[in-house]
Image: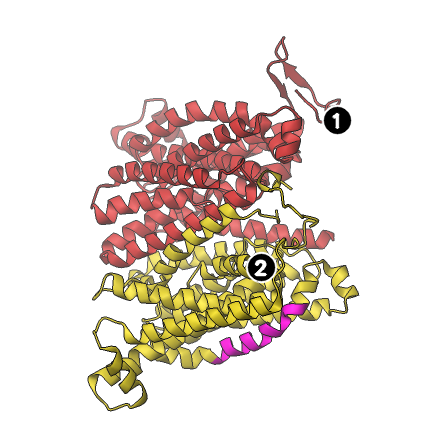
Amino acid sequence: MTTSTRNTRRRPTIRSRSDALSVRISPRAIVVGTVFALIATTAGIIALTTGDFPIPVADVAATLLGNGDPGTTFVINELRLPRILTGLLVGTALAVSGAIFQSVSGNVLGSPDILGFTSGAATGAITVLLVLHGTTSQATLGALLGGAATGAAVYALSYRHGLAGPRLILIGISFQALLASVNSYLITRASLGGAVTAKVWLIGSLDSRSWEQVRPLVIALALLLPLALYLGRSLAYLEMGTDTAKALGIDVERRGLALIAIGTALAAVATAAAGPIGFVALTAAPLARRLTGSSSPPLLTTALAGAALVTVADLAAKQLFSPTQLPVGIATAAIGGIYLATLLVQQRRRT
Amino acid sequence: MPTTTADRTDSTDPAGPTTTSVHPRRRSGTARAAGLVGAAVALAAICVLSVSVGAESLSFPQVWRVLWHDDGSNAALIVHNLRVPRTLLGLVVGAALGVAGTLTQALTSNDLVEPGMLGVNIGASAAVVVGISVFGVTSASGYVWFALLGALLASTGVYLIGIGGRAATAPATLVVAGAATTAVLGAFVNAILLLDTSTFDQFRFWDVGSLAVLGSGSLRATGLFMLAGLLLALPLGRALNALALGDEAAQGLGVHVNRSRALGAVAVVLLCGGATAAAGPISFVGLAVPHVARRIVGPDHRWLLPYSAVLASILLIASDLVGRTIIAPGELQVGIVTAFVGAPVLILLVRRARLARA
């Protein structure tokens, strides 16, 4: 299936006998992916050991192996571990979702935050929180419904003789504006306490996430990620434009719809678990792509980049203003913004 | 360009990636002028409606009488101190947002952009938050100056990062610079709001965008900026048309490329900074109105600019009117209504358009 001309000779490729499945291996992608995995792991270990109640690494290891004392076991297994795992999984889901949308719409702006899916999920959640006075776990259901409904609406309205990138983005932005204004309206109507809860939710937070959030995330990712990786191989062709992709034998309509469905599901699941953590979906894919120098979207590296981004950001948000803990979304936005600005400055130096 | 699927049989699309496509239906100057006059009449009508309708029910002859003879009655007070300033504010802010939107889309050659994305809104928000939290500003008239300063600083910053002293570099970098600034300042705003809940309690009402919160003082403070911006922007039509053909072609046509871009950028900053300071961040008007205007008059900026001004004023005043009558005696802030009115219109247009520009 490889059509890339220049690189095929250098890159080792693993093929199944019938050539139905083949994976091209890029040494650089492996290095970059490993570095991201190491960053995520290191951040995770630091997060496990530090906090209001510092625990030495040895005790953490013992606890994870099941030999800790009850106090440490509670802190590690019930408080810190679920939070870290939620961060890793949410980062992965958002990053892959962003990569899919950016490729399908052919535009960096086509990430789920800008297309309104995360705003839709947020509207669902804060409607449950502020209007129906539901609990946080009921808000999760609201988020799923809101995200899915927005995704379906944006897709249905954008589809007209095929799916054009600019139309998808404009309609997505329209929904985003609409829902964002609903969100701010709901916030002005609420009591101050309710408004703060909703605001934290809107920024995206990993605070007090438990196994209740981890379990559905694991199930969803176990289903969606392999599908995304399998179908994602055609993203490189979709990026070439509808006509070229069709000429190369891709069923553009069906592939596009399937990928968008997967991307929406990933974004909705992540938002339901941790709120619309900004900028992960937008930056992870371009970051991974730049570092690997790949011509097609490197989904696996992107996933690892997203996981690393969220865990590091959560650690920073937790420690920087301690004892006050800021939600992770603030840190991802700051990191993402600074990254974008550096990118611009670098580009200018080169020209 | 991935637009071919939507093209119809009358496609005349010689456009390269940076140019505006030739509109298939040419409109004569008289038709456009007549349309503009018609829109202006509609605007006048909606202004009269805005002055005569409100939470306090006053009859039209009564409103008309006190409008010209301030007899000190309750009705005169309502008309002169509340409704007229509010309508005027809607008029000026609307025109500013519409023209700024058209300018931004022309300068960035990207019709998915609105001025709020270039750092204006977030700069104003950040400065207002600092004003409330650090300087203890509580009055609406105090917000205005912070918002103005913040909007000016942030958008100037975005232009400097994006253009980097070389006005000719790809306009796309402006959008990215805006996104970066929005992200960083947004993180700052959110951090302060969460660390200082009493600031959040004030800020959340400014944040939705309203013509009511700030009152007539805000127009006096910001009106000059917006008027200056309008005067600067309206004569730029010819230059913007040339710029749409690409920098080299524009130069060949005798347009000072860098000077026109700089003038346009200054106008956007004045218009949006003034509008956001006067009424809070109202998104979407600057994005949607230019699209509507383009559908009506085509891509000629000499017509687009005045059309956007009038149409955006209509949208803003009408939205405000809807907002304060629909749940009377309560009030829906204008920023929310514009999104609700503008989004469906834009979606409809986008679905019908051929999207000649990718």
Q: Position of residue B128 (x, y in %)?
A: 40, 68
Q: State the residue at coordinates (69%, 55%).
A: A348
Q: Is residue A171 left or right of residue A86?
A: right
Instruction: Name the one closer to the observer, B2 or A259.
Output: B2
Q: How is the image coloured?
A: by chain
Colour that chain A carries in the picture:
red
Can residue A78 be found in the magenta stretch?
A: no
Q: Is residue A271 above or below residue B239?
A: above
Q: Is residue A2 above or below residue B71?
A: above
Instruction: Name the one closer to the observer, A350 or B158.
Output: B158
Q: Is residue B98 left or right of residue B252?
A: left
Q: Quadrant of residue B165?
A: bottom right
Q: Position of residue B255 (x, y in %)?
A: 73, 69
Amino acid under label 2? Answer: Gln
Q: Secondary structure at mark 2?
A: helix
Q: Chain of mark 1?
A: A
Q: Secondary structure at mark 1?
A: loop
Residue stretch in magenta: B224-238
The residue beneath circle 2 is B105
- In this orientation, does residue B247 appear? yes
- Which numbered marker is on residue A5? 1
Q: Quadrant of residue B147?
A: bottom left
